[in-house]
Image (cartoon, rainbow, N blue to C red):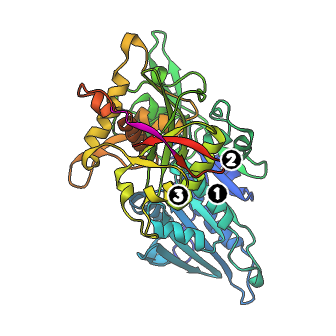
Amino acid sequence: MTAELRYTADGRPIYRIEGPVLERFMTSTAQVQVIQGPVGSGKSKACNLKVWSIAAQQKRARDGLRYSRWGVVRNTYPELKTTTIRTWTDTFPENVYGTIVWSMPARQRIFVGDIRMEVDFLALDKDEDVKKLRSGEYTGFYFNELQYGPKSIFDEMTSRAGRFPAMKDGGPSWHGVIADMNAPDEDHFIAMMTGQAEWPPNMPEDERAALTWPPEWDFYMQPGALIEVRNPDGTLRYRANPKAENVKWLPDRYYLDQIKGKTRAWIKSRVLNEIALVVDGSPVWPAFRPDFHVATEVLKPVHGHEVILGIDFGRWPAMLCAQQIGDRIFVQYELLGFNESAVTFAPKAKRFLEQHYQGYTIRAYGDPKGADKGQATDKSSFEVWDECGIHVTPAPVKLNAIEARVSSVDHVLNDNPSGVARFQLSPLARTTKIGMAGRYCLEKDETGETKPTKNRYSHPCNALEYLCLGLGEGRRMIGLRPISGIKPVRVALKRKSMRRVSA
């Protein structure tokens, strides 16, 4: 979207929305408003203008001014600074609307006419910003590129909106969350809530209820920018979609030039506005094949076989639950946490295990760094899990070497005697599947060294590495037999039981 060649008397540009979906989005008054569309479709600019429109319609306080406070959110600080704030300052230039103060979080105070709008720019990769979100009092939130955001933070935003202005000062005229996004991955909550992706098989009814789009919320789907056409010889070509929005403000052949040298998955997600897995780096496990390694049906626990857990600690913890039957590994469930410590995640994991594996013996392997003391407690993650009745053994890997961890999983994926997959992943473990399919990928760090990237997909993949190491796959790949020194010990649960752990 580009400014019309008209300006207000004080030099502010006048924008015009171009497209029926954008127009409906701009006039929505729903508490939650999400717009999904291709790159360049004007949705981010529309969200910026939507914030301004809501601020301008806030009822006046006793002093005659219109007060509002906003959280502008992105999943990481680099994207917040280089993308989100750059678009924001194009809409609200600092020389006209006020300088951004680069504090933690970054802030801008916009005082124009009778509008008094405070804006906090929040990145989710810093604990202090998440704490700011949880303790802050906001009128509303704008989440830029929601396809990268987890449902937990989205839920947090909806619960924190409507706190400013205070009711004693008249309260907000509107409160809620607005967001823009490209087409998400199939495991994203928006994809399931809006019917773009099916629910995982056998998903519990209470979880389905939480992933049902409320009728009071508004979701807007923009048309794809191009139309995919199949030639008589089976090859694909693309032509402009006459229903595409915002093209008036883009260069000629913008989208046809954008798709040059791009994969079909990138084109589907970023241009056609369809769900597809887009991988920016090289997959850590190129041997992973969803059609071969992902089970066609939900994997259920099998009595008579112990349950093996792989656990990744940290603020974004993950737990995978598996059983080894014969020589095959069946990963049945994943449990993920968001910005929570072991003190919060371990009891959640215990409740999950009691619900799905009551009466089974359990063996758990975790990140060796779990022996470190926490910042908020004198106890290590291992000690916290022990207190919940789950003894976790450090995964057998020297210095937590990433090469050994990655290779242990790679060995399982490639070791398929008689053409039968030794590794099977349940379709319920969607985040793990997407990670293994390529979102857990290799990227160069600041020093130029190539390492697996850290993102929301890396945590369950790390848990898988610890699980495979615990099962002895690290020894198998060098021709040694796994070590199995297992004995039952008594642990504290709601009822007495014997859980099996490593000696």
Q: Which residues are magenta?
A: 483-489
Q: Circle 3 sits on which residue?
A: 387
Viewer-closest of 400 and 263:
400
Q: Vertical placement of 394 versus 264: above or below?
A: below
Instruction: Classify residue 430 by image quadrant.
Output: top right
Q: Residues within 10 Å of mark 2 (few under 14, many from 20)?
A: many
For the C terminus, the image quarter is top left
Viewer-nearest of discs 1 and 3: 3
**Residue 472 in picture, x, y percent from top left:** 34, 33
Viewer-closest of 119 and 282:
282
**Residue at the (46%, 42%) spot, across then down:** 501
Q: Vertical placement of 289 versus 167: above or below?
A: above
Viewer-closest of 297 and 275:
297
**Residue at the (46%, 24%) spot, across then down:** 293
Query: Mark 3 vs mark 2: which is more N-terminal?
Result: 2
Amino acid type, label 3: Glu
**Residue 2 in picture, x, y percent from top left:** 51, 56
Tell me the element at label 3. Answer: helix
**Residue 68 in picture, x, y percent from top left:** 65, 75
Horizontally, residue 417 falls left or right of residue 24, namely left
Q: Circle 2 sits on which residue?
A: 219
**Residue at the (43%, 32%) spot, across then down:** 437
Tell me the element at label 1. Answer: helix
**Residue at the (63%, 47%) spot, across then down:** 496
Residue 62 within the segment the image draws in magenta: no
Q: Circle 1 sits on which residue?
A: 155
Whether residue 117 is visible here, answered yes or no, is yes
Amino acid type, label 1: Asp
